[in-house]
Image (cartoon, rainbow, N blue to C red):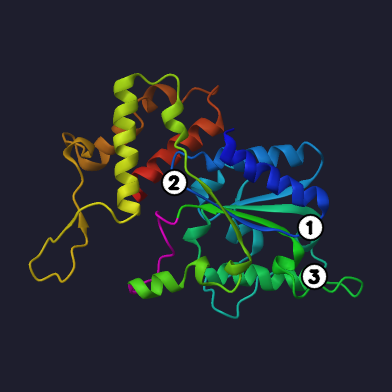
Amino acid sequence: MNYGKKIVYHAGLEVVYKGNEGFFFVHGHGGSEKTFLYNAIISSLRSEGKIVLAVASSGIESLLLPGGRTVHSRFKIPIDVHSESSCHINKGSQLAKLIKKACVIVWDKAPMTHRHCFEALDRSMRDILTTDEEPIEEKNFGGKIVLLGGDFRQILPVIVKGSRYDTVKSCITQSHLWPHCNVYVLKDNMLLSDSGLNPEQRSELKKFSDWLLDIGEGRAEAIKMDDNEDIANWIKIPQTLLLKSEKGEIEDMITKIYDDLQSLYTDSTLSTKWVAHRMAMTYYTHHNF
């Protein structure tokens, strides 16, 4: 755990031990090991008998968290969410009791989720957690500690037939909750520090990660595919990153990502984490472009 992750780790545990409320966001590009940080916080608190609810915006990402669930499954957030929505959680229900006992909610891939989902959970938790002895209607998420994480350079909420404006307005940063959020940024690419990489592999990996960051930061050169286009919106992918199809596009992609699948899929000694990792590789291959 490097210096940046240690700051977030100790900040998160400090508010738990002091019994304070907290709303955090961990921002970092791919390779900054955000998932490692979440798992460290979750494992540390659970080892002390505390309850941590681990959720993610996508099913694949939830597999990388211990006991992870999708956020819609865990908190009963409506699929057709709007500005006045609330979660389908009744006071006195088992889920309501679980939320009350939980000390922290860890939510990965938060930028993918519409801001109305966060607001629906906030609205419901204020209702669930308030009592006559402790009125907490004015506290974010009912005073519960919430740790969000993700990368705004990747997929934002998908708005069907929406414009760029609609997509930006749907982000958590546009919510009334965001000004109360403490943001931490992880900048180091921990993949480059792998001692098993030779100089050539490290150089190639750095070029690839820098290229992805250039796209996310808007520095990559954009081109027009049609003279009728007003703005250059297309990014040319380097030939070195393209698969040369021989058998078929889908089959070649599977072979490239799961090159050893045929010999390993029957191996009962493989852990669920290995499978989840390979699934995550597929996810990033599709979505980082």
Q: Is residue 67 at least partly visible in the picture?
A: no
Looking at the rendered image, the disc whose residue lies closer to the viewer, 1 or 3, is 1
Q: Do the numbered discs 1 and 3 sit on residues whose CB atoms are within 8 Å?
A: no
The residue type indicated by label 3 comes to Lys
Q: From the viewer's perspective, is residue 96 above or below residue 14? A: below
Instruction: Specify few, some or many for label 2: CA neighbours under 10 Å numbering under 14, 14-19, or 20 or more.
Output: many
On residue 125, the disc is none
Residue at which label 2 appears: 29
Residue at which label 3 appears: 91
Q: Quadrant of the N terminus?
A: top right
Q: Position of residue 180 (x, y in %)?
A: 63, 66
The answer to whether 26 appears left or right of 14 in the picture is left
The residue type indicated by label 1 comes to Asn
Looking at the rendered image, the disc whose residue lies closer to the viewer, 2 or 3, is 2
Q: Residue furthest left?
A: 227
Magenta: predominant secondary structure element?
loop
Q: Position of residue 247 (x, y in %)?
A: 18, 35
Q: Residue furthest bottom?
A: 84
Instruction: Specify few, some or many for label 3: CA neighbours under 10 Å numbering under 14, 14-19, or 20 or more.
Output: some
Residue at which label 1 appears: 20
Asked if the stretch drawn in magenta spans residue 159, the answer is: yes
Which residue lies at the image location 63% right of the left edge and 43% below the top edge? Answer: 7
Q: Earlier in the sequence, mark 1 or mark 3?
A: 1
Q: Quadrant of residue 159?
A: bottom left
Secondary structure beneath label 1:
loop
The magenta segment? 152-163
Which residue lies at the image location 53% right of the left edge and 69% below the top edge? Answer: 115
